[in-house]
Image (cartoon, rainbow, N blue to C red):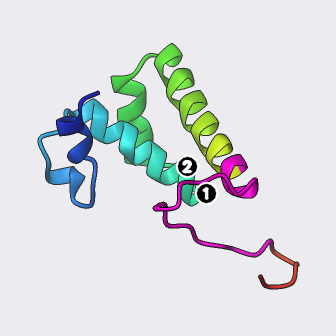
Amino acid sequence: MTEELASLIDDGYEDSDLEQRHKLAVDFTDAFLAGRPPSADVRTALRHTFSDDELVELATAVLAFHGFSKMLIALGLEPEQMDTIVHSTPGSASV
């Protein structure tokens, strides 16, 4: 991963010079973070592009990143320059 490659992962990445497998990884990650399954087209493309082992590694990496980022925020250890959004837990009082 290079800074140049990472800079392509932004809004409109679908039309960027990212390799197709990178775009699929971003599609998977976006769906995961949005709490929804990837579309049927993305799931089909993922299965054709990645091996089972690679899909497990991708899912595990996204899960670990997401979990650790939540932990840092819960502990108040996120960087000062990081934008955060507070969502209340369903059924709880608003924050």
Residue underneath mark 2: 32
Q: Residues within 10 Å of mark 1 (few under 14, many from 20)?
A: few
Question: What distance separates the C-alpha of mark 1 from that of mark 2?
Answer: 5 Å
Quadrant hosting residue 59: top right
**Based on the displayed image, in which of its 4 quarters is residue 20 positioned?**
top left
Residue 2 picture location, percent across and down: 24, 30
- Residue matched to label 1: 35
The 10 Å Cα crowd at callout 2, few under 14, some 14 to 19, many 20 or more, is: some
Say which amino acid is labelled 2: Phe
The spot of residue 25 in percent (x, y) is 38, 37
Q: Farthest residue in the bottom direction?
A: 94
Q: Is there any visible trace of residue 39 in the rendered image?
A: no
Q: Is residue 73 located in the magenta-colored stretch of the structure?
A: yes
For the residues labelled 1 and 2, say whether their Cβ atoms are less than 8 Å apart.
yes
Q: Residue at x 58, y 56 (%)?
A: 36
Q: Residue at x 86, y 84 (%)?
A: 93
- Height in image: 72 above or below 6? below
Magenta segment boundaries in residue numbering: 71-89
